[in-house]
Image: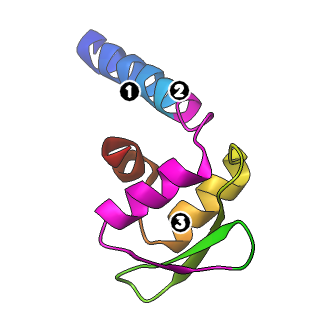
Amino acid sequence: MKKEMVADYMESWYNLIMKESLSGVNGKDAVKVFVKAGGVTRKGKGNHKNVKMPNGQLVTIPQDRELKIGLLKSVIKKAGMTEDEFLKLL
């Protein structure tokens, strides 16, 4: 029983740390991660880049600033990735 509690605690602690590390990601770094995951960059309007993902989705990412966590989570989901996969490639 104690081993299960410790494992649950460690998993929740790990998830807390991982979610905090999504903050501070800028657009250029996010594009690099999506390219590592198999995406192909395309030209976007203004300061935005489009990345065509292997699942067929086109994700648009602003390049000039730090991405808000909600936008980043949404783009990661649309790209067919999990947050853990994104962070491993970061």
Residue named by callout 1: 11
Question: Label 2, on which residue?
Answer: 16
What whole-number distance in Å separates the C-alpha atoms at marks 1 and 2? Answer: 9 Å
Q: Residue at x 53, y 66 (%)?
A: 77
Residue holding disc 3: 77
Ranked by sequence position, the earlier of labels 1 and 2 is 1
Per the image, is 20 magenta?
A: yes
Query: Label 3 amino acid?
Result: Lys
Q: Residues within 10 Å of mark 3 (few under 14, many from 20)?
A: few
Q: Can you tell which quarter of the image residue 53 is in?
A: bottom left
Q: Start and end of the magenta stretch?
A: 19-44
Point out which mark residue 90 bears.
none
Left or right of 28? Residue 11 is left
> Where, quadrant-wise, is the C terminus in this rendering?
top left
Q: Which residue type does callout 1 highlight?
A: Glu
Q: Secondary structure at mark 3?
A: helix
> Is 27 above or below relative to 56?
above
Mark 1 / mark 3, whichever is N-terminal: 1
The residue located at (41%, 25%) in the rendering is: 14
The residue shown at (40%, 51%) is: 86
Determine the residue positioned at 36% across, 16% down: 5
Badge 2 crowding class, 10 Å Cα cut-off, few under 14, some 14 to 19, many 20 or more, is few
